[in-house]
Amino acid sequence: MKIVVNLLKNTNFPFPVNIVNTLPIRVPQDRLPIIFVSAPADHATAKAVGPANYRRNVYIVLQIFLNFDDPVKGQQDINDLCSIVEDAIQCDRYFQSRIEGIMSFKFDLVFHADTAVPIAEARYEFECQYTEVFYPSGTDLLHIDATTEI
């Protein structure tokens, strides 16, 4: 997740954007536009019997909030921002080298008009796959004696 936060902080946006790595409990309207980066779910499956060697799928969620006065300009700004974010994730060589691939991603866009200033919210969910190997400490297990005594 830290990789994604740093990647977005180094992205050239057409206007200042705050990047934070927390879940949005309440959208701080005085800090918009803002991108929340989180990894709320992770799933691991053993690749084989033996040493702890897992294929992991982590779900990285980006929630983008942008306020606007003019609906046409707001829609254009959120579309531009989303396009830049998607390109940053999909085309960053360092990020792509740290994972085996983006298995899927989902995008949703919602406009909230029930706030003092209208807010556009875009949500990306990236399912990223990678391999993780754990190396047990201590002496290697070389022999198991399965005899029993009565």
Image (tube, grey):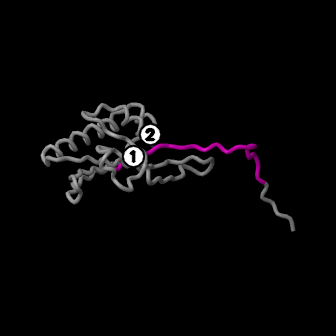
> Mark 1 or mark 2: which is in front?
1
Q: Is residue 53 left or right of residue 106?
A: right
Does 146 appear above or below 88? below
The reply to whether discs 1 and 2 touch (Cβ–Cβ < 8 Å) is no
Residue 9, position in %: x, y? 37, 35
- Badge 1 element: strand
Identify the residue at image location x=41%, y=50%. 59
Which secondary structure lies at badge 2?
loop
Q: Residue furthest right?
A: 150
- In the picture of the structure, the residue carrying the numbered disc 2 is 99
Q: Image point 31% across, 39% down: which residue? A: 17
Residue position for label 1: 37
Considering the image in quadrants, where does the C terminus appear? bottom right
Comparing 92 with 113, the one in front is 113
Q: Residues within 10 Å of mark 2 (few under 14, many from 20)?
A: some
- 16 above or below 117? above
24 lies left or right of 73: right
Name the residue rendered at 20%, 57% in the picture.
113
Q: Which mark is residue 122?
A: none
User: Magenta region: which residues?
Assistant: 124-144
Q: Residues within 10 Å of mark 1 (few under 14, many from 20)?
A: many
Dividing the picture into quarters, in which one does residue 92 lie? top left
Q: CA distance from mark 1 to mark 2?
A: 17 Å
Image x and y of residue 114, in percent: 22, 60
Residue 131 included in the magenta stretch of the image: yes
Q: Residue at position x 12%, y 46% from top?
A: 72
Residue type, numbered disc 1 = Val
Location of the N terminus by quadrant is top left
Residue 118 placement (x, y as % from top left): 21, 53
Measuring from the top left, give residue 13's x and y in whole percent: 28, 34
Q: What amino acid is labelled 2 in the image?
A: Ile
